[in-house]
């Protein structure tokens, strides 16, 4: 199933989260949240096991609440397509500290590899740009990923959107924790909010 | 969406200001909404606010996900929508118990009192049951005089007791939209 010259999802996510400092990372339902776990657990990892279509909006709520903290949403093409209207919502709010990175393998990898809309028609970079996210880029090389990384920490120049074409091969399943209340409260704790 | 009619009672009513005051007192900082005529005055207050950010959504479920992110980031939200939008939220409501969110929403009702557009009736008829099946407590203000008290009690329950709560504003209170005389 894998094509040549496409990026390895684990290498992309490891690069995005390297030397992350205080960055909060939201991982969309499916393989993306597993990729975050594979890169190493972190107090500010927001792992999602459901709520498909909601990853970008969770990132937006966080970014607006914490304007001095960089927030990156790492999700897949299927999850992004389900919440595609949220790009218009982000384009209207324009939080400088929010980045959205889609790992695009053009398929629903968790359910048997059925092809998604991005394989034949949907241009997510075009959609994001047309929704008012001026810094919207298509990425196909690790050099382009490396060039994006410092931008994730720039609190003023967002929002930004990147669509990264990745290999569709299945990788080892590395599961993150799945207690939602713990995950959220751990992020809150790391931001200085005490338990209720 | 329920169109705004400038002659309607809600433009002069005090209750939208009373809701705004409650939200301010509970330090609500993000107010996601899909507009509705019944909420129009409150939305205007929110958009003019120094402390609250009004966030227009393309669909109501976005607002539920936003609540989760804002809460993780330390801020409270109040989601404003009309009854038809409640159905759009159902799967996303699962985040509320999973994250134990202090979820609070104020819903303007359609399809229950002098409605002209029967397309509003199916969702208006199931709004309360949808909330309850989703684990969200429902309170209702039937008339203008009780809005402040009900919203105050609902906000206290949602934010202090972390008990997900929806306040329904009856169509009788909002007034039915006039399509034909």
Image (cartoon, helix red, strand yellow):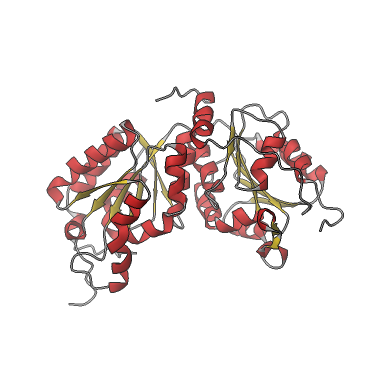
Please tell me in which quadrant of the rendered image residue A25 appears: top right
In the image, residue B75 sits, relative to residue A103, either above or below, namely above
- Viewer-proximal residue, A145 or A110? A110
A34 left or right of B99? Answer: right
Question: Whole-percent x and y of residue B36?
Answer: 32, 58
**Residue at the outermost left position:** B145
A125 left or right of B52? Answer: right
Rendered-image quadrant of the N terminus of chain A: bottom right
Question: Whole-percent x and y of residue B12?
Answer: 17, 53
Question: Is residue A182 at all visible to an observer of this figure?
Answer: yes
Residue occupying image coordinates x 39% and y 25%: A196
Question: Whole-percent x and y of residue A50?
Answer: 54, 47
**Residue at the outermost right position:** A4
B7 left or right of B96? Answer: left
In the image, residue B118 sits, relative to residue A82, either above or below, namely below
Question: Whole-percent x and y of residue B136?
Answer: 34, 46
**Residue at the outermost bottom position:** B180
Question: Is residue B51 at all visible to an observer of this figure?
Answer: no
Please tell me in which quadrant of the rendered image residue A95 appears: top right
Residue occupying image coordinates x 57% and y 40%: A96
Residue occupying image coordinates x 37% and y 37%: B102
**Numbered circles on residues, count:** 0
Please tell me in which quadrant of the rendered image residue B84 appears: bottom left
């Amino acid at each position: 199933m894998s094509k040549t010259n496409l990026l390895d999802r684990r290498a992309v996510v490891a690069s995005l989260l390297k030397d992350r400092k205080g960055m909060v990372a939201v991982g969309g339902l499916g393989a993306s949240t597993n990729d975050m776990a594979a890169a190493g657990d972190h107090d500010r990892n927001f792992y999602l096991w459901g709520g498909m279509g909601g990853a970008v909006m969770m990132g937006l709520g966080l970014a607006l609440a914490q304007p001095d903290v960089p927030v990156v949403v790492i999700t897949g093409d299927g999850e992004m397509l389900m919440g595609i209207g949220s790009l218009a919502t982000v384009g209207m709010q324009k939080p400088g500290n929010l980045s959205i990175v889609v790992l695009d393998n053009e398929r629903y990898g968790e359910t048997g590899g059925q092809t998604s809309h991005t394989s034949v028609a949907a241009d997510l970079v075009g959609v994001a740009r047309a929704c008012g996210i001026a810094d919207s880029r298509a990425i196909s090389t690790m050099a382009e990923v490396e060039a994006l990384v410092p931008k994730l920490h720039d609190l003023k120049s967002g929002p930004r959107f990147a669509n990264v074409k990745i290999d569709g091969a299945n990788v080892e399943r590395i599961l993150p924790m799945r207690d939602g209340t713990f995950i959220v409260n751990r992020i809150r704790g790391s931001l200085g909010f005490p338990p209720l | 969406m329920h169109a705004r009619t400038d002659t309607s009672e809600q433009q002069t009513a005090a209750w939208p200001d009373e809701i705004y005051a409650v939200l301010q007192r509970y330090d609500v900082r993000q107010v996601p909404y899909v507009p509705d005529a019944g909420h129009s005055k409150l939305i205007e207050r929110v958009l003019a606010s120094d402390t609250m950010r009004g966030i227009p959504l393309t669909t109501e479920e976005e607002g539920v996900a936003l609540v989760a992110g804002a809460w993780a980031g330390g801020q409270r939200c109040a989601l404003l929508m009309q009854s038809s939008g409640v159905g759009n939220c159902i799967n996303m409501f699962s985040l509320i118990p999973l994250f134990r969110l202090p979820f609070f929403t104020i819903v303007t009702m359609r399809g229950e009192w002098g409605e002209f557009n029967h397309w509003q009736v199916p969702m208006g008829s199931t709004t309360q049951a949808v909330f309850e099946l989703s684990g969200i407590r429902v309170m209702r203000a039937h008339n203008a005089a009780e809005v402040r008290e009900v919203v105050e009690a609902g906000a206290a329950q949602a934010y202090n007791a972390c008990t997900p709560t929806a306040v329904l504003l009856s169509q009788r209170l909002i007034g039915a939209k006039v399509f034909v005389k």
